[in-house]
């Protein structure tokens, strides 16, 4: 079963830590992951890392000459998981290493690969050292991939798996995710080589004892009249490209309906068009015409998304990126009268404040004022409910993809200090789309922004998730300082782009406000998972009536489809016994 791997413990026996309360769902997930390649999907804060630590501990014991890898997308995540797992596993410190791009030169890393047995790494380090032969890949016995939904396209997770498999060695794979996305679920599962997908969400009874009530509120704002006018001009400009796509049977939608074409739908349509046999039969000029129409329609869909989610200035940013791209199909849009009128109106109204701005301030003010009032009332009554100690702090996170808009929001909220003490929390540089590198996809975003997904120049639109806008990033030292202030209560509102969605060690918050929406169930789950972990929480969605509201409803349907198409977690009701050494069946 494991050729060339020396074992000293029979694999039917495995250890489960008793230094923490036993949660049956974690036990069952660990048991399954020890026996087969597995994808574990749990909401944020419910113990994916603990499951990984159990698997790593046992493979460390079973294979005294083997190496165990835990790979996470960013340096802060590597550090966080390194600290968490060391506490759980109880493996000697000399055998556990953290390796990132800051871990010294080649010689130091080669020595670490030789001396260590359990490694926490960024994917670039592992992929590069496997490629050059600096890391002995044939000694790997277990590989854990955090945020494993990234294992698609040309992301380094794919490179790592392909390089290890090329060595013809046996190793266990454990993928961790907040929730797998249906659109690329098959690709991720195929890439990981998993046999089981163990998926629980907060509605599952297994998680009920470990979660708190989470109130979800939709606050829908009406678009401004000027916004409606710009949107109508964008819809008019899109009719030509959409007619080309419909005639070519590449993408068909009623351009007059309220929602219009979507970025995700166009990206999927372009992918299908590329792979269709009839496409190859078309003359080259006809293929280029259809590709150009996809590019034009996708750009206009991004403009409308930015308009609804972030406002006129963000929509104008999308136009500026087109002009900077130099792409002929996009520049040709300037010949369209409706498009020119749209651009002129955006320029004239770029300073218009989005109606979400006062709505956001109202939500935050109400939250902090009610908290202060509850504190005063409890003090007068002589303590908290049932004599419990008072909570002395409450925190909120506002999620918004567009970096420049995050800075604008901070300026708007500054007038409400000291009740609201907000700080920006963004990534280190221009974010690239998730799960992808550069490609010639004409439905890709020409730049990083707008709030509708996408990353740097000409990245796959379906990847989504970049921190939009052109705003400056924050280095790790600046990020750490902001999080430190957030923990201490010096900052009580974090204005975060997508960096705040994933597994960083951000303190528990009582309120999540989504200034924009995402069509990705993964990102929506990650955002909501920041609250309701230790006490009741609230999630507010600020939506513009019309296109964005439709997008939110579609995202809810998508999340339901994800759950419906995945197998339930293994071994429901199979409760562990109290023995520390357990027989694996």
Image: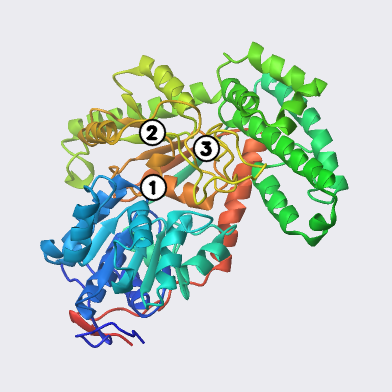
The local secondary structure at tag 2 comes to: loop
Q: Is residue 249 visible?
A: yes
Q: Give the foreground label among 1 and 3.
A: 3
* Residue position marked by numbered label 1 in the rendering: 502
**Which SS class for mark 1?**
loop
> Which residue in the structure is indicated by mark 3?
456
Quadrant containing the N terminus in the rendered view: bottom left
Q: Which of marks 2 and 3 is in front?
A: 3
Camera-side residue of 548 and 5: 5
Q: Distance between the residues labelled 2 and 1?
A: 12 Å
Q: Position of residue 251 (x, y in %)?
A: 78, 48
Image: 51 above or below 413 = below
Which residue occupies 39% across, 25% down?
Answer: 365
SS of the residue at dot 3?
Answer: loop
State the CA–CA distance, disc 2 to disc 3: 16 Å
Badge number at residue 426: 2
């Amino acid at each position: 079963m494991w050729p060339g791997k020396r074992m000293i413990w029979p694999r039917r026996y495995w250890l489960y830590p008793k230094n923490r309360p036993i949660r049956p769902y974690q036990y069952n997930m660990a048991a399954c992951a020890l026996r087969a390649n597995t994808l574990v999907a749990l909401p944020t804060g419910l113990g994916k890392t603990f499951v990984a630590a159990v698997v790593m501990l046992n493979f460390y014991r079973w294979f005294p000459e083997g190496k165990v890898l835990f790979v996470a997308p960013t340096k802060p995540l590597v550090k966080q998981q390194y600290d968490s797992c060391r506490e759980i596993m109880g493996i000697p410190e000399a055998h556990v290493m953290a390796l990132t791009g800051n871990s010294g030169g080649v010689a130091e890393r080669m020595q670490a690969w030789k001396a260590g047995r359990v490694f926490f790494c960024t994917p670039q380090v592992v992929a590069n050292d496997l490629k050059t032969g600096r890391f002995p890949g044939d000694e790997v016995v277990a590989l854990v991939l955090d945020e494993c939904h990234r294992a698609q396209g040309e992301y380094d997770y794919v490179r790592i798996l392909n390089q290890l498999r090329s060595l013809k060695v046996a190793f266990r794979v454990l993928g961790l995710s907040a929730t797998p996305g249906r659109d690329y679920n098959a690709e991720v599962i195929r890439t990981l080589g998993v046999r089981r997908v163990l998926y629980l969400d907060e509605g599952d009874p297994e998680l009920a004892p470990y979660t708190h009530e989470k109130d979800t509120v939709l606050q829908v704002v009406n678009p401004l009249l000027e916004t409606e006018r710009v949107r109508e001009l964008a819809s008019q400009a899109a009719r030509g490209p959409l007619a080309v796509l419909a005639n070519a049977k590449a993408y068909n939608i009623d351009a007059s309906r309220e929602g219009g074409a979507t970025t995700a739908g166009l990206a999927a349509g372009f992918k299908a068009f590329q792979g269709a046999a009839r496409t190859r039969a078309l003359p080259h000029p006809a293929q280029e015409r259809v590709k150009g129409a996809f590019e034009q329609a996708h750009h206009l869909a991004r403009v409308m998304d930015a308009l609804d989610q972030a406002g006129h200035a963000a929509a104008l940013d999308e136009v500026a990126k087109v002009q900077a791209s130099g792409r002929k199909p996009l520049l040709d849009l300037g010949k369209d009268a409706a498009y020119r009128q749209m651009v002129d109106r955006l320029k004239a109204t770029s300073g218009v404040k989005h109606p979400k701005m006062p709505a956001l301030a109202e939500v935050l003010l109400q939250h902090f004022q009610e908290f202060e009032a509850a504190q005063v009332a409890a003090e007068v009554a002589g303590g908290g409910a049932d004599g419990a100690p008072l909570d002395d702090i409450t925190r909120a996170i506002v999620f918004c993809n567009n970096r420049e808009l995050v800075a604008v929001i901070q300026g708007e909220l500054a007038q409400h200090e000291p009740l609201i003490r907000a700080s920006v929390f963004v990534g280190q540089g221009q974010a690239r789309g998730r799960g992808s590198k550069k490609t010639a996809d004409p439905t890709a975003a020409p730049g990083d922004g707008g709030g509708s997904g996408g990353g740097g120049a000409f990245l796959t639109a379906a990847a989504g998730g970049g921190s939009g806008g052109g705003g400056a990033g924050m280095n790790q030292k600046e990020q750490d300082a902001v999080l430190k202030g957030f923990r201490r209560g010096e900052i009580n509102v974090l204005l975060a782009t997508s960096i705040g969605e994933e597994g960083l060690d951000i303190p528990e918050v009582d309120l999540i406000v989504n200034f924009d929406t995402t069509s990705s169930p993964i990102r929506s789950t990650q955002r909501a998972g920041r609250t309701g972990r230790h006490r009741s929480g609230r999630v507010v969605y600020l939506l513009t009536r019309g296109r964005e509201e439709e997008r939110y409803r579609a995202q809810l349907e998508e999340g339901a489809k994800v759950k419906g198409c995945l197998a339930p977690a293994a071994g429901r009701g199979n409760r562990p016994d109290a023995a520390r050494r357990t027989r694996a069946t």
